[in-house]
Image (tube, coloured by chain):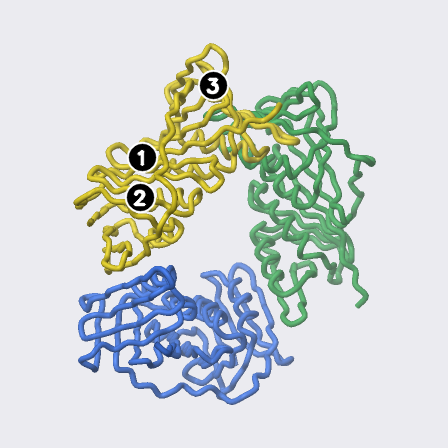
Chain colours: A yellow, B green, C blue
């Protein structure tokens, strides 16, 4: 295996966000892509990461393989890449992942492979009754707005409006996003569709906006149903998150 | 009541500074202005804030009224305003203050009104024997300079010179500001006028320089007498602080 | 004694770095220069600082003298200098060092002189078998790279290559710098020359890069032998560090 990235930022940004949610990650390396699917330790959020072979300048994979590493260690090494470095990933003879950063100088880091118990995570088969496509900045701002007042946030959609709303102990916040040039809303119900999610998790997930080529985000959810956020750079990288709803007795 | 600000920064910056000195604030809303007068919990400093009706694009006040809020909660909401947002303040039916931020999207926050015990603060009637008008940056730098060496600072004026001075346990600092183009000094005594103040309080107050249109500050004090600092943007906002002197037995 | 600097940054940056390694410093003031030689409290590192008389706009020293101050207090005062301030050093009658910052206003700080016990530090007579001259940025990056994986770092040189390498408990890092336009390597042995040093100390020392006029650093070391780093601005300032090797039983 020998994989070279001329734009290490796709891997760097992704792992930086993933490592905030997941400690250890098992990468599946196929002829098409590097993929990682993992649950956070509390079993509330799933991350789905795919870096396509077309984003590499060299992509030599003889057979499908899996390698697992500590994501926080990997993040620290990736932080050391500069924008004009070429990053090459290889396996050495001692069961380590070699990460070579070639720029002004050549810097090589080696990272031990680890064993992850348990089976491969399966991506759940979800059907969303509501889909919103909007600017990633709009979602980022809204999550930071509701973070001022509460711990959980409601996503509410009807055919013309997407509302993000939070009720704190004292203050409330309400963000109204209308369908229009910048925001497309699809809603399969005539009633409002509403579900509640953790702001703490969402704050980590919206970091994915850095991976969106056009600065947009795909938001999919349903009534008291999981939320899926997807950030994409076409033909290069896709980062999705699935977040369980908060169902409260009220 | 319905009040709209096209430049929310005047309210945002003021509340940010006020909330460092005072926890809760009672605003008096009249046909002319929104005003707040409050003492800090230690009874050492008074803040006097006035936002004139002419700084609003919409100012609909039927009758004089008073509303009180937690300033630190208000600050957190105001932090979310962007420079091109229009901020509208209204009261809802549930005894809450509605703060609407209208920009790219419309975001509404509601903040509970609170009860503040005690009478309205009266602004004391002070007569200052010394008045200095100088660049707010000059005062800011001087306070940061003396902060390196001590806890209290002396303001000393004669007819030609304004001196800011601090003696620490080890080091001393002395800043000499001469009357001239940038600094006007009025002093009603032939002797030096000197008084001592807390650096900790002054560090909070000099944040008012953000509200000075021309970048200047009015400094008024007397011999072992309170200090008054005033920052003004003409026809828009005025923020003043009164600080008790430190009288030491030496 | 009266010494004036039109570019206080040389003293400001130097003392800021020195005070991270040494608490108290004894300056030797001669007709040619201000010099300071000091060991860190753990006796692992020596700092050698020289600010030449030619970097001063006024340099009036009647006779050689020594003054000692707390470097961290001195750093705090120097932090208050602005780039267009002229800094003048004098002794007052009360055994204090007067530091006058003259810019827009005149600010005077006084700093007590202290007694330092013990004899003057002597600079050890060292002979280095390996000398590398390279970009200060290259060394800075390499030290930050190895800091990701370990606590100590090996400097390894042969006639064509300078390698910086660290083995952590888990990960390793290896930076290869080849002789060329930007890097000159002299090595007096046909074998590789290798020695180990503390990364924690090196991280403090590489701050010296701010004092290098051309952005370069002189790196001198030997087999299991002290390291010397030197940063220079010609005719103005020179800052060197000597660091003891880490000799481990392996």
For image coordinates 41% across by 78% down, the residue present is: C50
Toward the viewer: A6 or B212? Answer: A6
At x 51%, y 35%, the residue is A144
Of the pair A110 and B45, the residue shown nearer to us? A110
Instruction: Please name which of the two marks, 3 or 2, marks the residue nearer to the observer.
Output: 2
On residue A238, which mark appears? Answer: 1
Q: In the depicted view, which residue is nearer to us: A99 or C169?
A: C169
Is the residue under label 3 in contact with that under label 1 (CB below 8 Å)? no
Residue at left offset 31%, top offset 62%: C173
Which chain is indicated by disc 3? A
- In the image, taking residue B133 as reference, residue C66 lies left or right, namely left
Q: What element carries label 1?
A: strand
Q: Which mark is residue A27?
A: 2
Residue under numbered circle 3: A157
**Left or right: B192, with A213 as reference point:** right
Write down the quadrant of residue C209 in the picture. bottom left
């Amino acid at each position: 295996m020998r994989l070279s990235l001329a734009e290490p930022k796709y891997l760097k940004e992704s792992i930086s966000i993933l490592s905030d949610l997941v400690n250890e990650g098992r990468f599946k390396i196929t002829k098409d892509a590097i993929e990682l699917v993992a649950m956070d330790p509390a079993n509330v959020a799933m991350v789905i990461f795919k870096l396509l072979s077309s984003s590499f300048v060299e992509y030599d994979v003889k057979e499908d393989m899996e390698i697992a590493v500590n994501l926080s260690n990997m993040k620290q090494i990736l932080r050391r890449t500069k924008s004009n470095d070429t990053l090459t990933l290889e396996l050495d003879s001692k069961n380590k992942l070699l990460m070579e950063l070639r720029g002004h100088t050549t810097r090589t880091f080696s990272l031990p492979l680890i064993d992850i118990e348990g089976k491969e995570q399966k991506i759940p088969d979800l059907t969303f009754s509501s889909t919103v496509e909007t600017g990633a900045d709009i979602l980022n701002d809204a999550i930071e707005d509701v973070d001022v007042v509460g711990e959980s946030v409601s996503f509410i959609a009807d055919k013309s409006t997407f509302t993000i709303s939070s009720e704190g102990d004292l203050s409330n916040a309400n963000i109204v996003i209308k369908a229009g040039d910048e925001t497309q809303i699809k809603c399969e119900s005539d009633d409002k569709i509403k579900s509640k999610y953790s702001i703490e998790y969402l704050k980590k997930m919206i970091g994915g906006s850095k991976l969106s080529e056009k600065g947009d985000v795909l938001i999919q959810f349903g009534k008291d149903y999981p939320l899926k956020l997807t950030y994409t750079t076409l033909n290069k990288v896709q980062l999705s998150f699935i977040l369980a709803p908060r169902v409260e007795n009220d």
